[in-house]
Amino acid sequence: MKIDIFNHFFPKRYFEQFIDTGGIRDIGKRVRNIQAIHDLDFRFKVADEFGEGYTQFLTLPAPPIEAIAGPDKSPEVAQIGNDGLAELCRKYPDRFIGFAAALPMNNADACLKEMERAVTQLGARGVQIYTNVLGKPLDLPEFQPVFEEAARRDLAILMHPTRGAEFPDYRTEEKSLYEIWWTLGWPYETSVAMSRMVFSKFFERLPNLKVVTHHLGGMVPYFEGRVGYGWDQLGTRTSDVDYKALLKSMKKRPIDYLRMFYGDTALFGGRAGTVCGLEFFGIDHVVFASDTPFEPEPGLFIRETIKVLDSLEISAGDREKIYFRNAQRLLNLSKAEAGH
């Protein structure tokens, strides 16, 4: 059994109405030109390679809902996307074990309403958010009700990075070059969002919060020493803010809160990064994901991720945790729903 917890698909109406029109640049160009991201028959053909035990937990691909429409229209965009994902899960339960609802994060009131609708009426098992909301950090007060409600409902939050070419690599330039905004910018985005949540004491207020970081925690596991002993000295490098007082007010070390996040295995077959992430988060906080269909050839990321996980010197029980048991727990799936 394998539950691919972070992969992406556009329902037909959503794709035709909001994506295939060509109005979104950069990441919009990328997603429009991937057949398996909107062609259901082709999607099934790719998945068939991995047998009946392979199933997907669906999320909408980038761009975020709030990048598609303003606050007056974004709730409708989210509804169309979530209705489409829910319909796919109802029609093809063996293929799609569930979905994470998209939220119109530029409309705070509509976010909570859509979360309730998606969970109670459509059967969503989680929600997807992005690492920033049109440039705003997630630890602003306006976004706190989303996290509070997700924690209250015991929903998994799948956090996806977002950044575009308009975010320059250097202050003297106007845009990012060579797609650095994606290759290195997205892991940085994830790491920053995690850090802001830690220092804003999300996990002290919401100890049962379940946040799955796409791409195995971005840069955080690799920088274990810096986020560990480095942030144990928070405030020693800053003159105008009393960060030492903040550090003393926290009940745990910053690194201990960072380990409370979950990470997925969508590293495009990177074995060293997978080992690093597993050692940082621990077996119980890592879930199988492929990021399909963003591979250079159909099925490559699924194939390479399985190859890496099967090569690890871990017990069969721990491998099962990564492949499906952790996801089953995070998504509150019964054994019957999880197929095991």
Image (cartoon, helix red, strand yellow):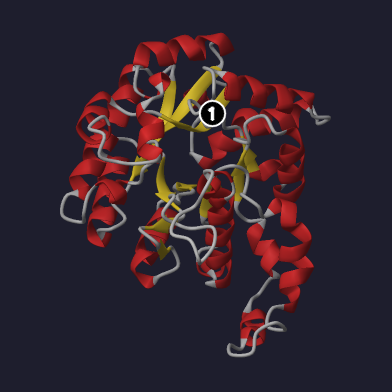
Looking at the image, which is closer to me, 37 or 119?
Answer: 37
Q: Residue under label 1, please give it.
A: 4
16 above or below 332?
above
Q: Quadrant of residue 60?
A: top left
- Residue that extends furthest to the right in the rendered view of this protein: 313
Relative horizontal placement of residue 152, taking residue 301 as reference (left or right):
left
Looking at the image, which is closer to me, 90 or 236?
Answer: 236
Could you tell me residue 161's position as x and y percent?
49, 49
Looking at the image, which is closer to me, 217 or 162?
Answer: 162
Whether residue 1 is visible, yes or no, is: no
Whether residue 108 is visible, yes or no, is: yes
Relative horizontal placement of residue 56, taking residue 247 as reference (left or right):
left
- Residue that extends furthest to the left in the rendered view of this protein: 72
Q: Residue at x 58, y 55 (%)?
A: 188
Q: Residue at x 46, y 30 (%)?
A: 57
Q: Residue at x 50, y 64 (%)?
A: 206
Quarter occupied by the C terminus: top right
Disc 1 residue type (three-letter): Asp
Q: Identify the secondary structure beneath mark 1.
A: strand
Relative horizontal placement of residue 313, taking residue 101 as reference (left or right):
right
CA neighbours of label 1 inside 10 A, class few (<14), some (14 to 19), many (20+): many
User: How many numbered badges does the structure rendering display?
Assistant: 1
Could you tell me residue 189's position as x and y percent?
53, 55
69 above or below 313?
below
Could you tell me residue 76's position as x and y percent?
18, 44
Quarter occupied by the N terminus: top right
274 above or below 337?
below
Q: Quadrant of residue 231?
A: bottom right
Q: Residue at x 49, y 39 (%)?
A: 331
Could you tell me residue 308's position as x and y percent?
72, 27
